[in-house]
Amino acid sequence: MNIDFIEILACFMVLFAIIDIIGSIPIILDLKAKTGDVQPVKVTLASLGIFLAFLIFGEKLLGIFGVDIKAFAIAGSIIIFLIGMEMVLGVEFFRQDSPGGGGIVPIAFPLIAGAGSITTILSLRAEYHTINILIALLLNIGVVFFVLKMTTTIEKFLGPTILIILKKFFGIILLAIAIRLFLNNTGLALTHGQ
């Protein structure tokens, strides 16, 4: 076992930023108003299932298409960079379709376990030990469940200004992470001391 608390913290922060459950509170509240209810247990378990499938079988799935983890990490870094740009600049590069039902679709997929977060899981595999990613993922899923359970209360407590600040802050973190992932997986990263 290669349990490393620094790796767990790094993975947790990356996943927390990309899943952006706090930033999704307004979307979840809107869906709740339209559909009447969001089922936290069902949504959380569905999200976890999607993440685990890609964490465990992601490389094999990529192998079918002849893509290695480094190439996918580079592609993922570009997507993460664009998501970070969306969060910081308030522009829209990706359209979020929200067809019916406030349960598994669209909250578990694509809101929580969407293209960006799935790509991030696979990208993290190129950088960190699987056990540390798994622990960070489980911690994030705990946060997702808590937020889904307490969405209305959290929104009232934080207020719109704090939600915007959090979104911008995590957007900047994502931009930095995307650049590092790109450099590390293209071999362009500078070594220490250069």
Image (cartoon, rainbow, N blue to C red):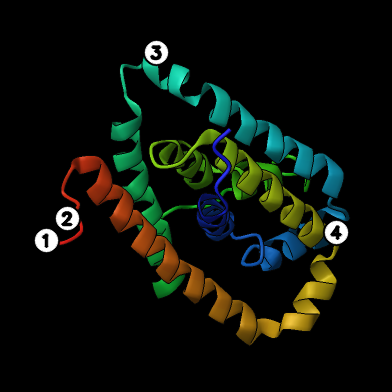
In the picture of the structure, the residue carrying the numbered disc 1 is 194
Name the quadrant of the C terminus. bottom left
Q: Name the residue under label 3.
A: 64
**Residue on which the image places disc 4:** 149
Place of residue 72 in the rendered image (x, y in percent of width and height, measured from the top left): 34, 34
Point out the frontmost of discs 3 and 1: 1
Circle 1/circle 2 CB separation < 8 Å: yes
For the residue labelled by badge 2, is the local secondary structure a helix, a strand or a loop? loop
Distance in Å between CA atoms under marks 2 and 3: 32 Å
Q: Are marks 3 and 1 in contact (CB under 8 Å)?
A: no
Residue type, label 4: Lys
Look at the image and tell me whether residue 99 can be seen. no
**Which residue appears at 55% of the width and 47% of the height?**
4
Q: Quick one: label 3 or label 1, which is nearer the N terminus?
A: 3
7 or 158: nearer the eye? 7
* The disc label shown at residue 190, or none: 2
Mark 4–mark 2 contact, CB under 8 Å? no
Amino acid type of the residue tagged 2 in the rendering = Leu
Question: In this rendering, which labeled residue sits more in front, label 4 or label 1?
Answer: 1
Q: Residue at x 77, y 38 (%)?
A: 45
